Image (cartoon, rainbow, N blue to C red):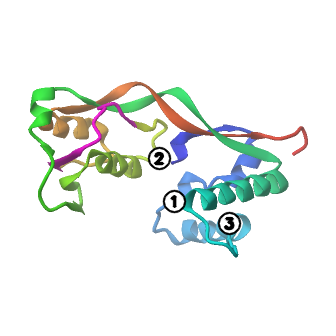
Amino acid sequence: MKNRIIWRISDSLRQRMELPLELINTKYYKTESNLRQWKKSNLYCYYLTHVNELGEKQKMDLYKQDLSRFLSLRFNVKAYVVYKSVESFCLYVKDKTVFEKFQMKNGAPKTSSYVNSYTLVNRPLRNLIAYLRTNNFRNSLPIADMTDYTGNVSRKLEADPKDLNAVDKALYQFGLGIKRGMSTLPMLIVERSGSDE
């Protein structure tokens, strides 16, 4: 997510590494043409071939090592993840008694999404968080889960997911709310490895 990255590099270098927001999800021919040009200049393909059977963690470690080498050689930068206290839109439990009524432990799992409507039936609450994050990637603040709940829920959210005020009002009936606050989240730090650009 773009709002989970902290850039500590020059603007000119950042423009080569980050897809500009104004080029994302548009239907204008000129913008789409600019998007294709940006991709042609800045995107690359990655293939990993290995002889021995590798576990998921081993493969992920290899991906990270290769990406670190590429960033260092291509851009002279390094990237790493740290947990930081940042301003966020925080999903929290407003009324525990009401919230518990929508917690589920059985039933056929189901997820459905339509325009301004998102339904979970016996699905993890984190799915709702992911749905809100995906629809608010342009927002300068990330979305954080402050509910401390890891189980499944059943609920139907009827609100424009990009309008967090509307989302807050729609969540009220489920004993939840969303508001600005501070949270500790994993943030990707991108910074220079050396002094030369």
Q: Name the kind of residue labelled 1 in the image.
A: Ile
Tell me if 29 is positioned left or right of 122 in this view.
Answer: right
Q: Position of residue 72 (x, y in %)?
A: 81, 51
For residue 155: magenta?
yes
State the CA–CA distance, disc 3 to disc 1: 14 Å
Choose mark 2 or mark 3, whichever is in front. Answer: 3
Query: Bounds of the magenta span?
Result: 144-156
Query: Which residue appears farthest toward the front when viewing the image?
Result: 52
Q: Which residue is mark 2?
A: 138
Lower position in the chain sequence, tag 2 or tag 3: 3
Which numbered mark, 3 or 1, is in the foreground of this view?
Answer: 3
The label shown at residue 43 is 3
Q: Residue drawn 75% across and 44% down? A: 78
Question: Is residue 197 shown in magenta?
Answer: no
Towards the viewer: 166 or 131: 131
Instruction: Give how far apart the Cα atoms at labels 2 and 1 are.
Output: 10 Å
Q: Name the residue nearer the viewer: 134 or 57.
A: 57
Mark 3 and mark 2 in contact (Cβ < 8 Å)? no
Q: Are marks 2 and 1 in contact (CB under 8 Å)?
A: yes
Which residue shows up at 60% across the image and 71% down it?
Answer: 33
Q: Which mark is residue 115?
A: none
